Amino acid sequence: MELLRHSFWIQAYLFWHAAALVTAEYIPPLEQSFYFDWNAPGQPYPIPVTAQCEVIHITWGRGTATGPNPTAPYYLQVYTSAFLVPFVISVGNVLQYDWAVPFYPGTLYQICMFDKNGHTGGCQDVYTVIPSNGSPSCANVTFPSPLDVEATVENGPLSQFGWIEQCTDIALMPQNGKPPYTMTIAPSLHPPFNITGDGTKPLNWTVSLSWASSFFVSVVDSAGSVWSNGLLHSAAGRSNACLAGVSVSPRRKDVVGIAIGAGFGGLGVGLVVGLLGTLGFSRRRSKKTGSTGSQLALRGSRPHTPQGFATDSLHHTTHSANNRVANARSGSEYYIEPFVMPPRSATSSTQADPVGTSASTPLLAPESTTQADEHGRMRSKVYVVHHDNGRAPVTVYAQEGTSVVELPPGYPGDATEPSRSLHSSGYDALDEGSASSARARSENITGRTEVSGQTEPSVLQRSRRPGQIFKP
């Protein structure tokens, strides 16, 4: 259930992210504040050609424009196919201006006009420069400071003379300059579009022009550095819904496909994450289980080597006791007396010493450690250590498969009772297949005494004495 919940949120995020990428935001063109042209008097139709260094007479006026009132000074913004910067020419406070076209033959150029507040007079048609009949002579234009811009479209980098599909985006990302930045889209015979940004993300414009419309695109920063590209054209796209003049999602089929892909992708990511989490949890759990099993397996690979068993048990007991003492002194209310086996006496040197004596006494492996009962089965001994002074934890030393029956500890004064002499030290010895009854334990103890032919070693007869209680 948790996996499905995470998968749902992943799918929802991918779906809305994909939908946001393909949603076209409609941006209206600027309102036109005045009109301008350079048509020859008496010419019924404009001819979009200009000879090199030919002087064109440009005039402008308010006319029937409904935009904001224009305010001088006025500026010409000239786009060309030969350069990646537009040329800005100040024409002053007049309403007419003569300008000699200085570009080489074959150059395409387009002129737009603005007043000092950025109100526009629109853009004229694209003109072509043709060779002059005489020797051309005119002043060159001044190049502005160039701006570095990264331009991309849906299928890759933006080309200078590309055809961009309708209702797809052009993204311009300034690489230098000073914000804010203004992106201008200048279609032929149409008011321009303006988009402003701070440079933290690309300036996006959705191509909302009819098929085969020509346009230039440019960017200017606050310091006057400029960049331009064109001549571009609007190509037939998979949808023309953006031409309706509202913000729409133009590529609905693409959105559905992306949403379906996002759904399957989210489900796949959720399954992979769930499988990895389950695998990691299983490995961690198996490591814990293996660690616990290794601590409980007392020499399971060598069940008939009492000497090694006694050595490991004594070493483990000493370190465990020291750790419990440190923990009790640091944060516990009780002090647990560490258990260390006392040294063997001379009379019990030939007896079975299951745990060991001291660090300086060598450990023996007597033959009586594992004995055979009347049915020929092997017996393995179990040792239970009861700790005194409050809540008494129990330490058990046994091999796998051995039944353990816990008996209460003995105290000083109980050693005089012959029936409890063996249990006064807190030790129990049981065979592997014995029942949990008291008679079976008594027979086991008696049988072991008869086999040895001697009394029990002093290790098993020693009484436990309570130690001093330490409180934090």
Image: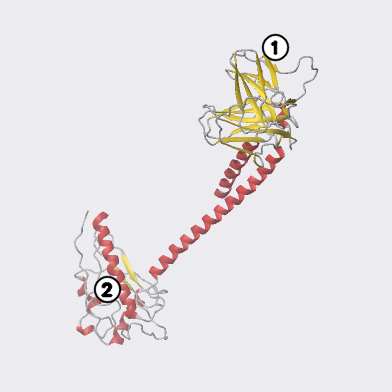
Q: Is residue 34 left or right of residue 444?
A: right
Q: Residue at x 30, y 78 (%)?
A: 354
Which quarter of the figure has residue 143? top right
Query: Where residue 63 is drawn, which disc sits there?
Result: 1
Q: Residue furthest right?
A: 44
The x and y percentages for residue 445 are 31, 80
Label 2 CA crowd tier, 10 Å (few <14, some 14–19, many 20+): many
Mark 1: amino acid = Gly
Query: Where residue 423 is drawn, which disc sits there?
Result: 2
Kindly tell me whether residue 29 is visible in this rendering: no
Identify which residue, 390 or 339, lies in the foreground.
339
SS at badge 1: loop
Mark earlier in primary sequence (2, 1): 1
Q: Residue at x 32, y 85 (%)?
A: 368
- For the rendered model, the colour scheme is secondary structure
**Distance (Cα) linking label 2 and label 1:** 121 Å
Kindly tell me whether residue 305 is visible in this rendering: yes
Identify which residue, 214 or 38, lies in the foreground.
38
State if disc 1 and disc 2 touch (CB < 8 Å).
Answer: no
Q: Residue furthest front?
A: 135
> Relative to 453, does residue 169 appear above or below in the rendering?
above
Query: Where residue 285 is drawn, which disc sits there?
Result: none
Mark 2: amino acid = His
Which quarter of the figure has residue 406? bottom left
> Relative to 415, does residue 188 appear above or below in the rendering?
above
The x and y percentages for residue 366 are 31, 85
The x and y percentages for residue 18 are 63, 40
Q: Is residue 132 left or right of residue 427?
A: right
